[in-house]
Amino acid sequence: MDREKLKSLTENSVIDKLYVEEEVTSTNDVAKSMSREGFKGRALIVSELQTKGRGRLGRNWSSPAGTGIWMSLLDTDTENLVNIPGITLLAGLAVAEVLNSLSGEECARIKWPNDVVINGKKVCGILTELISSGTESTVIIGIGINASMDEFPEELKDKATSVFLEIGQKPEREKILTGVVTKLTEYISAYKITGSLGFAMDRYHSLMVNKGKEVILSSANGDFYDNPYIATGIDEEGNLLVEDKSGTVHTVQSGEISVRGVLGYV
Ligand code: BT5
């Protein structure tokens, strides 16, 4: 990552601090340490390689060197942040919009709650974490975007893709990163002011890949519900709305449930 090409982020006060690293365990871990050491403000940590990239629920995030955008945005100004899952949705929206403006088409879609997909495969995953100590808290938004890899390890082949494989150009990672961080910080400001996702709802719904589709819900402890449901959209807090066979609408929170399509991942 070329630090020079990212300097507009600090010059335009989108962020207060920029850390460009060669190798870290996880950019979210670096952000956590900074928060514990008393950092105040908004910082971006980006690394060429993560040796222990993390997904949700302790899952692994493959983060090979030089081919992806592995980043965390840390924000200690959380007083007016009503709802952390909403931030994940805004991050997905920002990534999908930036990838679509790069490709000139609406090919990138959001799979609620934390994936961005192109042609049914995952190009980006998001891990939002909240660190609290006493009355202070910090939100850490970890975003992984597969940028220029031309192949994936066996276990990810069917599920993962990259901007290069789908859009056909080796993207300038700094350009995507600058676009995503600029958009995301604007969205977070709007979210803090309005206290709701209302301002982003129409755009979110137009890019939501599972809207109007049959979905299968499953919980972490293996309980299954009355599947399949129809995903009808999100509410202003970012919960998923699903309709069961009798037409009753249920509200699903992101922490408690996995969602997949009837025929597979999407
Ligand atoms: C996620 O978790 O999708 C969140 C991923 C967040 C990664 C970023 S990178 C910067 C920051 N630092 C971190 O340590 N993490 C964040 P989840 O929904 O649990 O999905 C994880 C699953 O995605 C894995 O179990 C694999 O099946 C799959 N996977 C792993 N690596 C992938 C990759 N590079 N591309 C696509 N899918 C991947």
Image (cartoon, rainbow, N blue to C red):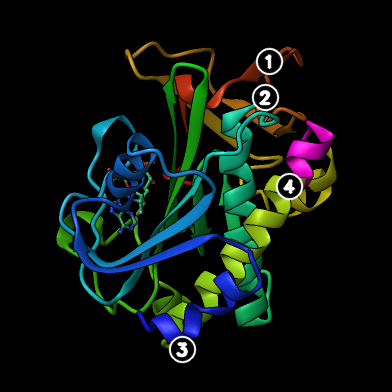
Residue 161, quarter of picture:
bottom left
Instruction: Let me know if residue 107 appears in the view.
Output: no
**Label located before the other in sequence (2 or 3):** 3
Q: Which amino acid does label 4 sit on?
A: Ser
Residue at the (47%, 23%) spot, across then down: 255
Res 50 label: none
Question: What separation in Å lies between label 4 and label 1 (alpha carbons)?
Answer: 29 Å
The residue wearing badge 3 is: 169
**Stretch of the chain drawn in magenta:** 190-196
The spot of residue 261 in percent (x, y) is 50, 39
The residue wearing badge 2 is: 242
The spot of residue 266 in percent (x, y) is 49, 47
Is 4 rendered above or below residue 254?
below
- On the rendered image, what quadrant is the N terminus found in? bottom left
Q: Do the residues labelled 3 and 4 touch (CB within 8 Å)?
A: no
Residue at the (36%, 46%) spot, across then down: 31
Res 189 label: 4
